[in-house]
Amino acid sequence: MLGGNSAEREVSQKSGSAVLSALRAAGVDAHAFDPSEKPLSALVEGEFTRVFIALHGRGGEDGSMQGALELMGIPYTGSGVLASALAMDKWRTKLIWAAAGIPIPDYELLTAASDFAAIEARLGLPLFVKPANEGSSIGISKVKEPGGLAAAYALAAQYDSLVIAERFVDAGEYTVALVDEGGKMRALPMIRIVPSGDFYDYEAKYLRDDTQYLCPCGLPEAKEKELAALAVKAFALLGGRGWGRVDLMLDRAGKPYFLEVNTTPGMTDHSLVPMSARAAGMTFNDLALRILEGAKLG
């Protein structure tokens, strides 16, 4: 299942096309299905036995498609309804993590009536502003100058009514890919992300060729194991299953700050989960099959 109507439609088409090719190469009778072009009833009429969800963003990664497939009784890949909805909502993810002791950056919820100057002073500059329910860095800004928060809020508010300002963590961005292995989530080798631009935005993720991805990530083995275990816990707290990706930052003292969970990560040629899987000795085809085998209901 690819495409859809979200702001991440183009990325989803690339992910879905790559997965489709991999599954067919492995001998799976796989077919492309774009829910923006066909009614979901066509899944039943076509007698499809399971769905590999390669949709990103709203309508595909937020629990709504998972709920529809539950009602139709068609097993699907990845997390269920609740975990998908929670992970899509960065604010509610933060609430759960903070309550369970997972470290997160300081943040503020923004509205048009917010005292932007006071928030800049409390969180410090630079800071990030992001829509709470978007992915692929869509609508995100890095505010570096005093007085810039209002414009950043206005941009993010174009994509979501819920907008977050988040303290900047300055020493490195990392991601932990997770896949189910025998009913237990396994953390794949961590990746450090080093964008050539100001931050890891949409262009750096999908269009540029000068973003650096370091795998091995350069951390001591004990530190990587510690962070991987925290990532597995953070994923489990939301109810995640099947596969996913947990993003975090480290400060200069080596303290982690967890940012978000992707329950349907990208599967493009620039994507991080396939990159991490390769480092673990798993081909793209193997990865796609592993994810498909985990399709389930409930």
Image (spheres, helix red, strand yellow):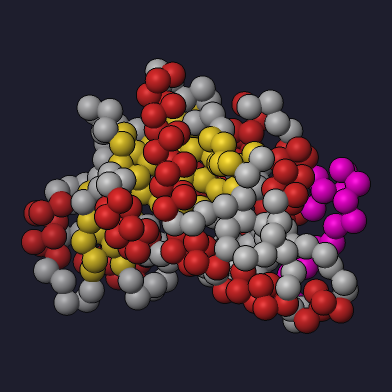
* Residue 146 in the image: above or below residue 217: below
Q: Is residue 153 left or right of residue 48?
A: left
Magenta stretch, overall SS: loop
In this view of the protein, which residue sits in the foreground, 97 or 248? 97
Q: Residue furthest top?
A: 220
Residue 212 lies left or right of residue 78; in this view the side is left
Q: Read off the magenta span.
A: 18-37
Residue at the image position 73 percent from the left and 73 percent from the top: 73
- Residue 119, x across and y down, in percent: 13, 60
> Is 160 contained in the magenta span?
no
Which residue is more in the foreground, 28 or 34? 28
- In the rendered image, the vertical position of residue 229 relative to residue 116, given as above or below: above
Q: Is residue 36 magenta?
A: yes
Q: Relative to residue 17, is residue 70 depicted above or below?
A: below
The spot of residue 169 in percent (x, y) is 26, 40
Q: Is residue 88 visible?
A: no
Q: Is residue 222 left or right of residue 98?
A: right
Query: Which residue is found at the position 88% from the left and 74% from the top?
Result: 46
Q: How many numbered dots are placed on residues in this image?
A: 0
Q: Nearer the viewer, residue 64 or 142?
A: 64
Residue at left offset 30%, top offset 42%? 257
Q: Quadrant of the C terminus?
A: bottom right
